Amino acid sequence: MLKVEHLIAYYGNAQALEDISFEVNQGEIICILGNNGAGKSTTLMSISGVIRQKEGLIEFNHTDISKKQPHEIVSLGISQVPEGRRIFPTLTVEENLKMGGFLKKRIDQTKIEEIFRLFPRLKERRNQLGGSLSGGEQQMLAIGRALISEPKLLMLDEPSLGLAPQIIDMIFDSIISLRKAGMTILLIEQNVELALEVSDRAYVIELGRTVLTGDSETLRKDRSIQSIYMGQQHLLHG
Amino acid sequence: MYFDIFVSGLAVGCIYSLIAMSFSLIFRSSGVLNIGTGEFVMIGGLVGFSLITDGTQNFYLVMLCTMAIAGLVGYLSNVLVFHPVQKRGGQSIHVLIASIGIMIILPQIGSLIWGAEPLSFPSSLSAGQVQLGSAKISAISFSIILLSLSIMILFQLFFKFTRIGQAMRAIADDRVMSQLLGVNHRKYIALIFLVAGALTGVAGVLLGPLYYVSYDMGIIGIKAFAAAVLGGFGNIMGAVIGGILLGLIEAFGGTMISSEFRDLILYAILILVLLIRPAGILGIKKRRDTA
């Protein structure tokens, strides 16, 4: 479905990605692991078309999307929930959700009700401003907002960041139920244990390069790989 | 007498509000501090003068045409100047210099076309009174207040209830996120420049019957900028409040304390307010425009 080959990207004058290659197939959950600053978020922003200075191949359903504008990429069916959720603080919960369906022009109210069923907390707060929500509620809203456009590929950047353990469980339960419904997911996650538990395959990137790939199951068992490539994260969660 | 001062202060204040809204709309959506905004007011005033003396006597038609022309000037300022400067990596300081360029170039063009003399709108427009209960107020002040307030209310409704209005608020909150949801922000920022230009154009035409119009009237933009900062820069409601407040302070300060030191009083109060509330009355909303 998504194929990235030898992706190089620049952030201002600095080269942020040196050589990133990976593939996501229909129905898979793929996770990308790596330390802070390894280039995980830059990879997602490059796929979404926000970062323009890049070389290499980005193919979605056999179409080259590396030169396309962000709005064209969204309309092809790639949605991103960025790091830090980026809820519109001065828009209400419902307005935030409606923005998720911006390209649809007419928003189907049943679609919004569907999100409210997935995250009932959002329904209670539908008229509250986005900026007044807790971190967990913002994450639910961010995922809900990305789902309104009915994407083929959902990219999640650090969905567990800064959240309490029960909320993390809840978010990951919803990720698992999305996958059961047939959603293809590209996941970036600092919590290695959790990421390897929900994903099918994983890629490890380091200093802007893909350095390792494998079955999540296999990687989970191989503790030495974890401690080499994923630093102290493993010590904290293992 | 207090009522008269109040009405004329409110009328001028409403005009400041319209211009301040233009400052805030552009800044909040695109990050451009367009210090040349007042020159769009000048274009509006002078175009309005030409239309009303050589064209139609219908003031509303003149207003609509002026909105269209000033809107076009606003749109072109983005397409020809601000967007290219930003796209080539210009920082806010470079954009500011570009807007100072506009502030200097446009009046010169204005004086080439309309000359250096101040021009008066037909006196029929500024005469006349409206009976309001037991009080009589000047018809032009009444129209200005009514028109400006309607425009401001329409704007609030547009931002609250339309798809495009919501997208514009989303761009103002977080440009990159709006892109990630499929908003072609460039298109909407261009549209905001058009709308902001139209707002200043109306302000120019409304000022005409109140004072006079001339190539150097764009200096009013500085007062409107102060109004926008007073209300909370980038905040549309703040721009409305700041403008009206500035008009009232000016009217009461000028008539009751000293007309000679009107501006001194005005800016002293402005600085005082900013010392107490540095972010303005309603505060500044944060913008986010990086990945």
Image (cartoon, coloured by chain):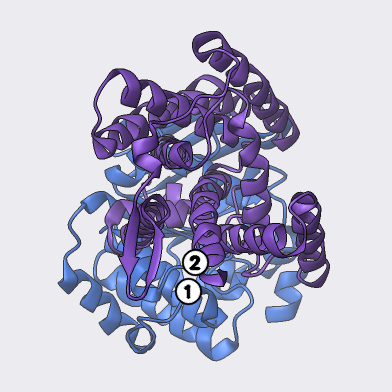
Left/right placement of residue B34 relative to residue A174 reads right
Residue A157 visible in the picture: no
Residue A66 x %, y %: 44, 31
**Mark 1: few, some, or many residues within 10 Å (few <14, many ≥20)?**
many
**Mark 2: few, some, or many residues within 10 Å (few <14, many ≥20)?**
many
Colour assignment, chain A: blue
Letter of the purple chain:
B
- The quadrant of the rendering that contains the N terminus of chain B is bottom right
- Give the number of the disc on residue A130: 1
Mark 1 chain: A
Q: How many marks?
A: 2
- Give the number of the disc on residue A73: none
**Is disc 1 placed on a helix, strand or loop?**
helix
Residue A157 x %, y %: 53, 61
Mark 2 chain: A
Nearer to me, A150 or A112: A112
**Residue visible at 51% across and 25% down in the picture:** B77
**Residue visible at 74% across and 79% down in the picture:** A236
Q: Callout 2, which amino acid?
A: Ile
Residue A198 visible in the picture: yes
The residue furthest top is B112
- Give the number of the disc on residue A87: 2
| Residue B82 falls in image quadrant | top right
**Is disc 2 placed on a helix, strand or loop?**
loop
Where A115 falls versus A200 (above or below)? below
Marks 2,1: beta carbons within 8 A: yes
Left/right placement of residue B191 relative to residue A206 reads left
Q: Callout 1, which amino acid?
A: Gly
